[in-house]
Image: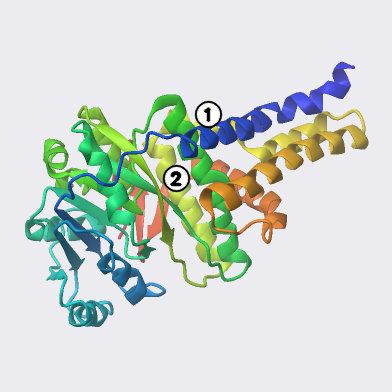
Amino acid sequence: MLHNLLPFIAILPSLAYSLISLWCALKYFNKNDHPARNHRPLAVSIIKPVKGMDKDSYDNFASFCCQEYSGKLEIVFAVASPDDAAIPIIRQLRDDFTNQDIKLVINPALHGPNQKVSNLINAFPQAGHDIIIISDSDINVEPEYLRSVTAHFADPQIGLVTSLYRTSDVHGIATALEATGFTAEMVPNVLVARQLEGLTFALGASMAVRREALLAIGGFEALSAYLADDYQLGNKIHRAGWKIALDPCFVESVIKPENLMAVLSRQLRWARTMRVSRPGGYLASGITLPFPAVLLATLLAPSPAVGAAAVALLYVVRLSISTLFSRRFVRDNLFPRWLWLLPLRDMLAFFTWALSFLGNHVEWRGSRFALKPGGTIEELV
């Protein structure tokens, strides 16, 4: 009897984590205490650090200009080079949205190894309002985005509001591998962390921060030596005594067609960055990964039939929950079309987790960096 139970014991942590993530999602998305969006609109400065062109750059930028928002709004684009390919797009945006306060800062000054943070530091003097939103250049938002995000600041203890993100449009297997990871891994992980310990980090797709909270941690300069500037911004604000809120309005991460090697390189960079930023939690997360559970269940099974039964149970639950996330919570509609890819996605998640412990070098924006303890980086010549 014990031999027959061993494969099912092996899958138990991953199975339990899937069920816990579902419970956390139901608790979060079904709650009725989201802040009202009819509060007094706040004045907002959006800073967009930009380097080069993304897929649908104009549409992504324009989505921030088409907000159903009555408060004051300014958008500050920050680039390092006067030859940046995105500059004509930004100028076209200013011509098309003359009713919007759109600024362009071109400044090559570096304030540390993180060039994105240098752009933020250079743009910050042009941001005149007390609520500052930092959003990546490849993000597209819904018209109610600003109303939803700024509503949280009715609570004076909220220092930062971050948003979940999804990708609804993929371009083949390579990008689908990445996008399904948002649905089946990232979103569940964030919701579990929020429920069990509260948010102590931010997600770089969208971060809205009080000026007071930002200045309390030393401004953007406090992030210039880190690769995971989004994690550090949230963590430093949390440790300064402010609360972090998670907004239910998803933003869209628009990805361009890429080959598998580019996707794998980015996945490894993210994994190594999180490993040095949260070493204890990241190490413990390996217990919940499905792929090693499948391997262990297969090895411990007294017969192929028992092993197959354990693996089938795990994936019936996992595939069902991932589909529910995709259709009801995330609403990216990637599943069930790409459901067959989930076991491969699970294998990729395990190997990037394992490989993250075997090196400290990452590639980012055409440069190579060495990761230091705590998440700081040093550019390699």
Q: Residues within 10 Å of mark 1 (few under 14, many from 20)?
A: few
Q: Which mark is residue 77?
A: none
Distance from the alpha carbon under mark 2 to that under mark 1: 14 Å
Question: Can the viewer see residue 114 in this picture?
Answer: no
Image location (x, y in percent) of residue 349: 59, 47
Going from N to C along the chain, the mark reached first, 2 or 1, is 2
* Residue at the (55%, 67%) spot, across then down: 170
Res 109 quadrant in image:
bottom left
Asked whether disc 2 touches disc 1, contact meaning CB atoms under 8 Å apart, the reply is no
* Residue at the (40%, 58%) spot, across then down: 363
Res 34 quadrant in image:
top left
In the displayed structure image, the side of residue 327 where residue 337 appears, left or right: right
Q: Which residue is mark 2?
A: 272
- Name the amino acid, label 1: Ala
* Residue at the (21%, 30%) spot, across then down: 157
Image location (x, y in percent) of residue 6: 80, 23
Image height of 329 relative to 363, above or below: above
Name the front one of labels 2 and 1. 1
- Name the amino acid, label 2: Arg
Q: Which residue is mark 1?
A: 284
For the residue pair 230 and 33, the one nearer the viewer reads as 33
Image location (x, y in percent) of residue 212: 11, 39
What is the secondary structure assignment of the residue under circle 2? helix
Res 305 quadrant in image:
top right
